Amino acid sequence: MKKKALIIEDNNDIRENVVEMLELAGYTVFAADNGKTGVDLAVKNSPDIIA
Amino acid sequence: MGNVTLLNAIIEHAIDGIIIVDDRGKIESINPSACKIFQYDEGEVVANDVSMLMPQPFRNEHDGYLDRYRQTGRTHIIGIGREVTGLKKDGTTFPFNLGVSEVPFMGRNIYIGFIHDISHEKKAEEQLKEYTAHLEKEVKRRTDFLKTAVNNLEDAKEEVSFSLEKERELGQLKSRFVSMASHEFRTPLSAVQLSASLIEKHAQPFDNESIRKHVYKIKSAVGNLIAILNDFLSLEKLEAGKIEPALVNADIVKLAEEITGEMQLVAKQNQTIIYQHTGPDRHIFLDPNLLKNCIINLISNAIKYSGENTFIEFNTEINDLNCIVTVKDNGIGIPETEQLHLFEAFFRAHNTGNIPGTGLGLNIVARYAGLMKGKVDFKSELNKGTIFTITFPQS
């Protein structure tokens, strides 16, 4: 089972880059561009790491 | 001596002038003092009307005065005395006190006038008035001068406070610009840095030296920019008083070893950072982030300003009195004449040449250390090396 990561970042370039890096590192990645979506995703997926 | 002779002598030598006139105003006799005062010889005045000794308009009015007195018995001068004006032979006038007594003499009335010249008193009085007027004028002149000076000062004050206000506004504008620019620059730079890392990863299968070299160049250039922006932001926060040290208990050896590891990664070829701690105690009560920032600044300076194949000595010591951090290099050193300005913001010594830097690092170190009651000292010798010491008092 892959570990799950959640990234919350409003800058598109940075968010996309971090997503790519985490995926390369073997994570299943969820991304949000605002806090509210971030909280929703965290509750729904219970990620192992949030950044 | 007979009484008459005595009286004559008194009149003859009296200092005041004495003139005797009849009830028609005709001069019957005049003593030498009065002659002298009016500049006439006795013969020139006796039997003449006394009004000859008066200037106009009194001369013409004198007969009227006499008539009025004879009819009404009201007097303005007889038995009273007053200050009047006399006319000398040469046409000049002078002030004198005139006392007139009415004397019944052998069945008629004669009038004796005592003339006391007050020219000198008058002159002195005039002089006093003149002097007072002059003084008043002088006081007014000086007061005006002071008023002008005060007005000028007030104008200057207004101008200064206006300038200060302007400067404050400019300062705030600068602060806002710097912190806005630094923030806005940092985000795209972070994206560039992340992208460079990703390119590095994606390029790994190709094992291409050129790609590696250029990715490294991008990463280090971006790293430098981020470091500069971080310095700007730190300075802005320091200026705004926004940085409060968060003092906590920490292990200095752990912190120092962490820093040594990080800095060894960015050191030059064969530059070795040697860390050593002295003293049985390793516990500090400081802000680890600010302390780390200070030490990283000093070690990166040591790396920057010394050559390859050198040692950088990094020491910490805790004794009863102080916690001491030292960083020593064998680098280019700081010229003695410039050591005084070393901690000023944006100051860089002349021998730094084309070594990059903003001149903010040591300013920030000194201020961070200061926030934790620490003090930064250094010893340096040109082309030999430099040793920086931060001393934090215990307790």
Image (spheres, coloured by chain):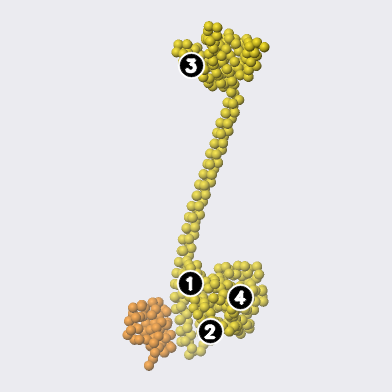
Chain colours: A orange, B yellow
Which residue is label 3 attached to? B75
Q: Earlier in the sequence, mark 4 or mark 1?
A: 1
Q: Nearer the viewer, mark 4 or mark 1?
A: 1
Residue shown at the point (47%, 80%) measured from the top left: B193
Task: Check disc 2 and give the amino acid type.
Answer: Lys
Q: Are marks 4 and 1 in contact (CB under 8 Å)?
A: no
Q: Are marks 3 and 2 in contact (CB under 8 Å)?
A: no
Q: Earlier in the sequence, mark 3 or mark 2?
A: 3
Which residue is label 1 attached to? B244
Q: Which element type, helix, strand or loop, lies under badge 3?
A: loop
Q: Which element type, helix, strand or loop, lies under badge 2?
A: helix
Tag 2 and tag 4 share a subunit: yes
Tag 4 and tag 1 share a subunit: yes
Q: Which element type, helix, strand or loop, lies under badge 4?
A: strand
Residue B252: x %, y % from top left: 54, 81
Q: Which element type, helix, strand or loop, lies under badge 1?
A: loop
Q: Is residue B2 above or below residue B131?
A: above
Q: Earlier in the sequence, mark 2 or mark 4?
A: 2
Which residue is label 4 attached to? B388
Q: Earlier in the sequence, mark 4 or mark 3?
A: 3
Residue shown at the point (54%, 43%) measured from the top left: B145
Quadrant (top left/top right/bottom left/bottom right) for the C terminus of chain B: bottom right
Task: Identify the subunit bearing mark 3.
Answer: B
| 10 Å crowding of disc 4: few (<14), some (14-19), many (20+) | many
